[in-house]
Amino acid sequence: MKSVLVTGGTGYIGSHTVIQLIEAGFEVVIIDNLSNSKEVVLDRVESITGVRPIFYPYDIRNFDALRELFDQYDFESVIHFAGLKAVGESTEIPLKYYDNNVSGTVTLCEAMAEAGCKNIVFSSSATVYGDPASVPILENFPTSTTNPYGSSKLMVENILQDLQASDPEWTVFLLRYFNPIGAHKSGTIGEDPRDIPNNLLPYVTQVAVGKLEQLAIFGDDYPTKDGTGVRDYIHVEDLASAHVKAAQQASNFKGTNIYNLGTGRGYSVLDIVKTFEEVTGQSVNYKISERRPGDIAECWADPSLVAKELGWKAHRELSEMLEDAWRWQSNNPNGYDS
């Protein structure tokens, strides 16, 4: 049985990936400091798969703990999700983001190198494209960032590329996510943001369930079909499957492999709200507010490279993404505290 280490494995995307890894026959070991997730996720994963993943409440900045882990297990690959991810917060406490996301990855890679585990799948972001000159976005577009969160992702990408160039034994996957939404079909795991959600869909579902009063739509004067921002939304289950595919095929790839993970289609904020109301029968109270600094008009992917090279494609339509997100939220109005 192949063994894989998943950092940040109790988080939103990590937990969905853990389920699919278990279903694909991997032995899964999770490390997560639980700064933005809850240990009850392990119970939910076990209820779905019949297998309880091995869990250690470790921080990726703790080299001694990582060394002990790599001594104990013979990991074939590491899927690296662990990181702080709130754009707004990153502008307020940038040093914490650089310490956790950048320094933590350096420490993780040092432990991996010492153990001879040289396959890493990194959770990156479309934020590394900054404000793209055109859409759809290709992997060879120039990179730039508009906030410390995005900068931390781009720094890690550069570090991993330099590492691989220095040692050809490394296989690096840089997976640039667009906008993950949705939840597991069972409705037992999903996105559970702490405090006020930073992302659109959990805000929509929390308004619909009555937890929040009103959705603010930031700007209706963008050069888009209805004036609201357009993004590429991808089901978290499709996103998870790309990580499983990368872990399965890591031994067949060498070098640094950079892929966009999206559907190749953009939806506006009002598209999301109206489609959500149609498929769920729930109304969403919203108001139009001023644009937020740093927001861009359009951001959607050209995912053809990952389809060609890794054989992966997103399959789920927007209606299914929204139905699954609502099933999770309505079953768990207070998230994992329900």
Image (spheres, rainbow, N blue to C red):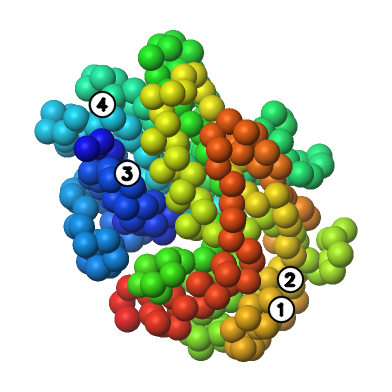
Left or right, 55 with respect to 150, comes to left
Which residue appears at 73% of the width and 71% of the height?
271
The tag earlier along the polypeptide, 2 or 3, is 3
Residue at mark 3? 7
The image shows residue 166 at horizontal and vertical percentages of 44, 11
Left or right, 276 with respect to 80, comes to right
Q: Residue 274 has which mark?
A: 1
Q: Nearest the camera: 52 or 140?
A: 52
Residue at mark 2? 271
Residue at mark 4? 111
Q: Quadrant of the C terminus?
A: bottom left
Q: Rounded to the nearest whole Å, what is the CA distance between mark 4 and mark 1?
A: 48 Å
Helix, strand or loop at mark 1: helix
Say if 269 sits above or below 223 in the image.
below
Camera-near label (1 vs 3) is 1
The tag earlier along the polypeptide, 1 or 3, is 3
